[in-house]
Amino acid sequence: MSNMDLNFPFPFQPYAIQEKFMKELYATIDGNRLGIFESPTGTGKSLSICCSALQWLKDSNRKVLEDLEKEIQELKNEIASQADADDWLQQEYEKIKKNQTLIALQNKLDKMKRKMAAFSELQKRVAKQKSNITNKSDYFQADKQKNMRDETAGDKENVLEENSGEDIDLILDDYDKGSDQSDDEEDIIDEDDDPFTKIYISSRTHSQLSQFVGEIKRTVFNADTRVVTLASRQHYCINSEVARLKNVNLINERCLDMQKSKSKPTLKGDDGRVIKKTKTKACTACPYYNQSNITRLKERLLVDILDMEDLVKCGKELKACPYYASRMALDDAEVVLISHAGIVSSGARSGISLKLQNNVLILDEAHGLTAALENAHSAPVSFKQMSSVKTYLQFYINKYRSRLSSKNLLQLNQIHFVVGKLLGMIKPPSEKKQEAHIFTLEDFVIKAEIDHLNLRPLVVFCRTTRLAPKLHGFSMRYNQQVLEEENKKSTVSKKSSLQEFLSNISKKKNDKEIVEEEVKIDTKPNSLVPTETSAGSGLYALLDFLEMLCDRSENGRVLVQCDEDTGLLKYLLLNPAEHFAEVVQQCRSVVVAGGTMEPINEFRSLLTNNSPSGDVNVVKCEHVVPAENVLGICLSKGPTNVSLNFSYENRTSNELLTEVGRILRNICSIVPGGVVCFLPSYSYEQTVYDHLKNSKVIDIISKKKSIFREPKSANEVDQVLQKFASAIKSKNTERTGALLLSVVGGKLSEGLNFSDDLGRCVIVVGMPYPNVKSPELQEKIVYLNRINSGAGSIYYENLCMKAVNQCIGRAVRHANDYACVLLVDDRYSRPNTISALPSFVQKSLLSNCTFGQSIGSIAKFFSRHKAKK
C-alpha cells in the first residue's frame, strides 16, 4: 500500500495537517527511520499519533502473518520439488537446513496464532465475568471477609513482633562480599522474543499519558488493542500501610519485604497463641499480592483499556495490586504508555524488564526530554539528608555495636566516615554563606579526602544488606533524645575483647581523620510517616550520589552548594545525550514529537548522537487555526514611550514596574474574557503584584476583571483555575473576565488548556533567561563551547525560548479559537528571537511596536471577531 493510499480511522473528518502528520508518521515507522514531528498544541497531535501508529501496528502484524505463511508455503514447495542432485550429501544437507528453517517459522506462526486466539478467549472470559454481576458481588463479599480476617491476623502478628523488644528486624544480616546479587531483585519475565511489535508511547507526566488512553478509546482500535500504562509502586500501590511511606525506594523495599514474609508467617497453635516468633521480618504479607486476583486484574486491563486512575480503582475492587497486574500484562501488551523518566533511565528500564529491541518508541511532549535525561543522571543529596544519616548511623552503631558482626561494623564505620567528610564539604565557612563550587570527580574525592576509599563495595554493602530501610525503621522507632540517653548509659557498660579492639581502631581512626560535628535534628517523637530528610530516604539519595561518583565519567561534575539550609551535593552529567543513544540503537524506529520542536538541531543531535549520517525525517505541521485568528505583537515601547528591556538589572526599576501596570490596565480594559500574564519568576511576580497593589492599579483592574495569582502549592492549582474559569463565565455585567498572574516554567505554563474565553490574551513580560551566574549553567556552557564554538550561547538562548513557547501554547487550542499573544520586551524583536517563535505566531507577528500601535491592533482584532459572532 503506498503512502498516498492510506486511510486512517479518524473519529471525525481530519484536517489536512492531521492527514499529513499521520501519513508521515506511518511512513517513518514503516521505514525504520528516526523522526522529529512538530504539530502545534491544539491540532489533535495525540489523536493523530494514536490513529497512525495503531494503524501501522495492525497492518504490520497482518503483514508479518501473511509473510510467514507465504514463506512457509514456499519452503514446503521447495522441499517437495527438490530434484535429485549429483551430490546427494549436499542435497541432504540443504534439505535438513530447509526443514530446520521451516520448523522455526512454523513455531513462530503458531505462537502468533495462539496469542491471537488466547486474546479472543480472554475477551469472552472477561465479558462473562463482568456480566455475572450476582456471582461477582458474592465473590467480592467473601473475598472482602477473607481479607479482613487476614489483615486482622496480620495486625496481631505485627503487634506481637513489635513488642518483642528484640529489634531483630533492624539488625543487619551477615554480609558476604562474594554475593553482590540481592535476593530482592525481581524476576525477569519470559526472555523469548515477542513475535509481535510493541509501540511504546512516552510523555512527560502521567496525566498526559492518561490523555493518550482517552484518545485510543475514541478510535476504532478501542475494541481490540491491548494497552498498558506503566508506573512505579508509588503511583500504583493501594496498600495504605505501604503507600504512606511516600519515598519510592522505601515503598519498594517495604513491598518486597511483604512478599517475602508470606512464606515465613508467625506460627500459632490450636489455641491461637504464638508458638514460634518470626525473627527475620516484622511485617505481614500484603493482602493485595494475591496471584489469582492479580491475574484477573491483568486480564481486565488487557481487555478494557484503563488509565492509571481506572486501574487503581479496579485494583481496589478486585483486591489486586495494580503495579504487579501492569507488570504481568506487559508481555501481552501491544501499546505501552510510560513516562519520559521510565524510558531515559537505564536502571528504570531494567527494573521493569522493558524490551525496546526492535520495537517502536514515540516520545510526545519532547521539549521536556533533555530535562528528563539530565534529571535521570543527576543525584542531589542535601545537607539535611546527610545530617540525618550521620546522626542516626552513629546512634545505630552505638546501640547495636555488640550485636553486629565485625565485618558489618567495619563497613558501617567507613560509611559514617564518608558521610562526615561529605558534610564537611557542604558546611559553609563561618564568614561566608551560600557559596557554590564545581569540581571534576577526581578533584572532588581528593578535596573530600575520600580518594583512598573504594566506594563501590560500600554502596554494594548498603544495597545488599538493605541498610537504608533498616536505618529508616530505626529512625522511626527511636527519636534522638531517647538514643542520646541510651548512649550515655552504654558508655559505662563492659565490652568484649573483640568489641574493645574494634572500638580502639575506630577511635584511632577518628583521632586522626574524623572530626565529629554536632548535628541538630528534630527531637520531637517521630511520626510513622517519613519526612524528606528521614534517615532512610537520605541514605538512598546518598547512595545514588556515591554510585555516580564510582563511574568516574569525564563528563561528570559535582556541584557543592555551601549552606546549612539549602546546602547540597549534586552530581551533574554534562552530556546525558550519550545515554539516550542506547535507546535509539535498540528501537526499530524512534519519533520525538511536540508542539514546538525548535531548535530542531538539538533533537537531531540527540537522535543521531551527533552523527552527520543519521537519517531523520523532520515533519513540520501548520496550526489548524487560520492566521487571522492569531495576533502576535512584540512590544518594544511602553505607554509613556519607555524602552521595554526587562533584563535582570533593569526589571525591578520603578519606571518599568509602572509601565507594566499601565500595560495591564489598558489590556484588561479592551480584551474580553481571560488574560493570562506570565512573569519570569515567583519572586518577580511578587514584586510586580506588590507594586500594582501599592500604586492602586490592582483596584482599578479589579473593577474590570477579577485578579488571580498562581499558587506556590501544587494542590491549590485546581482551586485557583476553577475560580478563574467561574469568574470568566460569570454573567456579571460590571466585570468582563479575569486576569491570572502566572510564572514561566511554573505550574500553569505547561500542559494546561486556556481555550476560548479562558485565554483570549497571553502576555509574556520579559525574557525568562535562566540565571547565567548559576555554576551548573556556566559549566554546561563552557563544556558546549569547548565541543563547538558558540554552542553554549545557542543552548542558553534555547532554554529561554522553549519556556516562552510553552506559555504561548496555552492559548489557541482548536480551529475556531482566537487569541492575542503580547510579548513585552524589546529583545523579542531581534531576528533570531522571532525565528525561534512558533510558526503560527510568526505569520501574523507585528515586531518593534509602540504601545499606541499595539492597542490599536488589539482593539481591531477583537472587534473583528466580536462582529463574526
Image: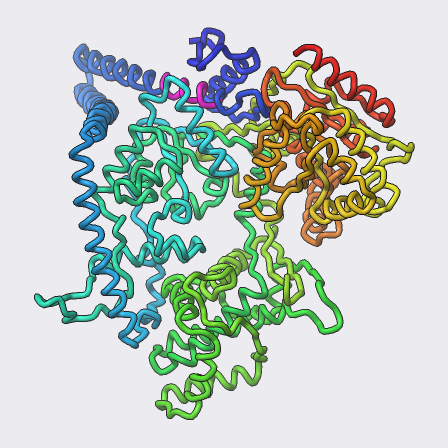
Q: Is residue 137 left or right of residue 25?
A: left
Q: Position of residue 766 (x, y in %)?
A: 77, 38
Q: Which of the pair 216/466 is nearer the observer?
A: 216
Residue at the extreme top of the image, as rendered? 5
Q: Residue at x 39, y 23 (%)?
A: 217
The quarter holding residue 848 reads top right
User: Does the magenta run of residues contain 794?
Assistant: no
As drawn, the residue found furthest toward the right would be 641
The mark tally for this picture is 0
Q: Is residue 90 visible?
A: no
In this rendered view, identify the residue nearer to me: 821 or 833.
Answer: 821
Q: Is residue 342 left or right of residue 262?
A: right
- Residue 47 in the image: state x and y as whole percent: 48, 22
Q: Which residues are magenta?
A: 49-59
On the image, the x and y values in percent for residue 589 come to 47, 27
Q: Residue at x 40, y 89 (%)?
A: 500
Instruction: Identify the residue at horizontal 28%, vertical 40% (top origin).
Output: 317
Q: Is residue 58 magenta?
A: yes
Please state, as top left, top right, bottom left or bottom right, where the C terminus lies in the image. Answer: top right
**Placement of 60 over or under 288, stated as above or below:** above
